Structures are given as C-alpha cells and as structure tokens.
Amino acid sequence: MTQLGEDRVYEQIGEDGFDRLTASFYRRVRSDDILGPMYERARTQAGETDLEEARVRLRDFLVQRFGGPTRYSEARGHPRLRMRHMPFAIDEAARDRWLALMDESLDEVGTPEPSKSVLQGVFAHVAEFMRNR
Ligand code: HEM
C-alpha cells in the first residue's frame, strides 16, 4: 500500500523526469568522496564498464515504485533492497550524503511539486532503512 500520491509521481514527471534525476544523481556520485568508492566497487564486482548500468537499475526501480512500468522486477526480480545494500557500509554519513546528492539533483532538474516532496519523503524513509552500521 503506497501513501497518498505516490503512484501519481510517474504521471507527473514521466520517464523523462526519472531519467534526468538519476543522470544528475550519478554525475554527483562519481566524484563524491563517500559514495564514489562504494559505487565504484559495486561496478567492478559486477564486471561493468561504467555506472550507466547502475543508473538504469535505480531509474527503473523508481519508475516502478512510483507508478510506471515494471521493468525493474522483470529484470531483477524482487528488489530485496536491504539485502542488496548489505555489502556496503551504510552509516549515518553515507545515508545523509545519499539524500543530500538526491536533493541537489531534484533541484538541478527542477522536479515539480508535489512529486518532489513525495520523492523526498520516500527517499528519507528508505535511506534510513538501508542503514546497516
Ligand atoms: C542510504 C544510502 C544509500 C547508499 C550508500 C546506497 C548505495 C548503493 C550502492 C553502492 C549500490 C550498488 C550500485 C549498483 O550496482 O546498482 C546501490 C544499489 C541500489 N540502490 Fe542504493 N544506496 C542508498 C540508498 C538507496 C535508496 C534510498 C534507494 C531507493 C529509494 C536505493 C535504491 C537502490 C537500487 C534500486 C539499487 C539497485 C539494486 C539492484 O537491483 O541490484 N538506494 N545502492
């Protein structure tokens, strides 16, 4: 059961909104002193050449989570997000940085209300759930 308005986000910002948001986020991740090395390690372990494939996983997850097509589960199955984040040491600093980079990205791409607030609420909740240190 989603909170009021969550499945309306896809209606409001569409594929393009999630595409631009995740592109902006991953641009920031690359040069981030806390998150950069974590995503880089994940990339190496997955045998991938750049972070584009990780960006697409996040984009497709968000598209599905907020009311769009279910490509994420078709490709990856059940999200099991907490388990998938266990290899990474996610403490308060990592959680706060993830949320800060996402805030900057929401501003950069100009994600409109009410989608922006709905996204921020879910991000804060899920990021805390991912904390494992
Ligand atoms: C709390 C701070 C967080 C950190 C440090 C973090 C870090 C990471 C890292 C290093 C990966 C591996 C990149 C890849 O290969 O896909 C990943 C994957 C992923 N993260 Fe996070 N993450 C955080 C929060 C979140 C939140 C809040 C969400 C959702 C709203 C999220 C959704 C995902 C998804 C969907 C994947 C791909 C899972 C898969 O199918 O393998 N993460 N994250």
Image (cartoon, grey):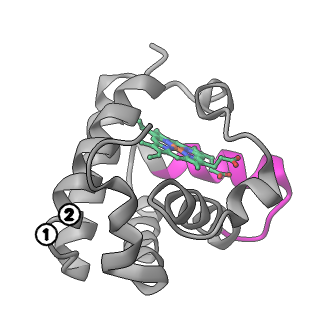
Is 42 situated left or right of 125 in this image? Answer: right
Give, as a three-letter code, the residue at label 1.
Glu
Callout 2 secondary element: helix
Say if mark 2 contacts mark 1, CB within 8 Å. yes
Q: Is residue 39 magenta?
A: yes
Q: Determine the residue positioned at 20% across, 63% down.
A: 116
Q: Determine the residue positioned at 30% across, 78% down.
A: 12
Residue 116, disc: 2
**Is the residue marked 2 within 8 Å of ligand 1, measured from its CB?**
no
Q: Determine the residue positioned at 67% across, 46% down.
A: 41
Is 105 situated left or right of 24 in this image? Answer: left
Residue 97 can be seen, yes or no: no
Q: Nearer the viewer, residue 107 or 40?
A: 107
Q: Determine the residue positioned at 50% across, 59% down.
A: 62
Residue 47 can be seen, yes or no: yes
| Magenta span of residues | 36-50
Q: Quadrant of the C terminus?
A: top left
Q: Quadrant of residue 1?
A: top left
Residue 113, disc: 1
Give, as a three-letter code, the residue at label 2.
Lys
**Is the residue marked 1 within 8 Å of ligand 1, measured from its CB?**
no
Callout 1 secondary element: loop
Return the x and y of residue 58 as percentages of the image width and height: 56, 59
